[in-house]
Image: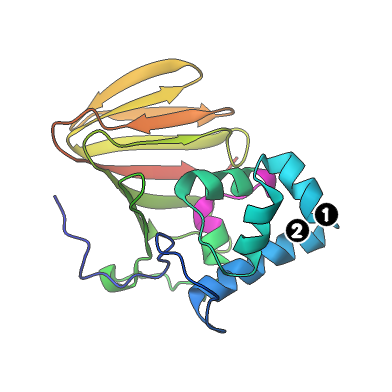
């Protein structure tokens, strides 16, 4: 299992905090979520209706008082038609062509036992991105819809086993296997154990 602890945490959305300090990544993420809603002219009630997230939770997110889980952020990304990596890129400086390991953004959701490292972050003019994901044994993450309908995904398992549900079909993907598909609906990643699973995910926008 690759140890991610030495890698700088670009976005740490597993901790709750009472008001993000101005200029921090947490604060910029909160501000960006507010901007996306304002750009569409939606009140909080409308975003709540579209996302299925309560108005109070959305308000706390935009004020920087609460950080989203993977599931919650996935719902907002779907509403705003963005991949998770692209949203996070919008609150960071544009990455260079060479992305050193120490500068690859790491996002942790300890509540679900999920760690996501953006190996090749979204970049202007490029359609693909590469992600390294790890799930603890027994952990699962589910997304209610595709962030962008028809997005192409390739999942290459590096260590362990993962169960991936796409279009209602469960695929058991073992170490060395690669599952590829176009995502247009809900999906779910589950690590049956007994060990963690580590996989590479290639995402290509349609």
In depth, the one of 53 and 201 nearer the eye is: 53
Of mark 2 and mark 1, the one earlier in the sequence is 2
Residue 42 disc label: 1
Q: Nearer the viewer, residue 81 or 193?
A: 193
Q: Is residue 186 magenta?
A: no
Mark 2 lies on residue: 37
| Label 1: element kind | loop
Can residue 92 be seen by looking at this rendering?
no
Q: Which residue sits at x=57%, y=36%?
A: 146
Q: How is the image coloured?
A: rainbow
Image spot of residue 126 (x, y percent): 53, 56
203 vs 205, left or right, is left
Magenta residue span:
79-86
**Residue 96 in sight:** yes
Q: Quadrant of the C terminus?
A: top right
* Residue under the image location 39 percent in, 51 percent down: 130
Query: Percent x, y for residue 103?
Result: 34, 72
Do labels 2 and 1 touch, CB within 8 Å?
Answer: yes
* Residue drawn at the location 48% of the way across and 29% of the way down: 187
> Which residue is outermost to the bottom?
22
- Give the farthest residue toward the right: 41
Answer with left or right where residue 27 lies relative to residue 32: left
């Amino acid at each position: 299992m690759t140890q991610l602890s030495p890698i700088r945490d670009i976005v740490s959305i597993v901790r709750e905090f009472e008001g993000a300090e101005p200029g921090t990544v947490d604060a910029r993420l909160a501000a960006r979520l507010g901007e996306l809603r304002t750009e569409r002219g939606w009140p909080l009630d409308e975003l709540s209706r579209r996302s299925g997230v309560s108005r109070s939770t959305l308000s706390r997110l935009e004020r920087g008082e609460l950080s989203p889980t993977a599931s919650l952020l996935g719902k907002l990304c779907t509403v705003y038609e963005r991949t998770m990596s692209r949203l996070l890129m919008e609150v960071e400086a544009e990455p260079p062509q060479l992305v050193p390991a120490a500068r690859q953004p790491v996002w942790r959701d300890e509540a679900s036992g999920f760690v996501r490292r953006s190996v090749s972050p979204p970049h202007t003019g490029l359609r693909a991105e590469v992600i390294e994901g790890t799930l603890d044994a027994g952990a699962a993450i589910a997304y209610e819809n595709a962030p962008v309908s028809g997005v192409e995904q390739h999942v290459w398992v590096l260590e362990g086993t993962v169960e991936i549900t796409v279009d209602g079909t469960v695929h058991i993907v073992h170490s060395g296997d690669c599952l590829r598909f176009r995502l247009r609906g809900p999906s779910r990643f589950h690590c049956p154990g007994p060990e963690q699973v580590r996989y590479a995910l290639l995402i290509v926008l349609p």
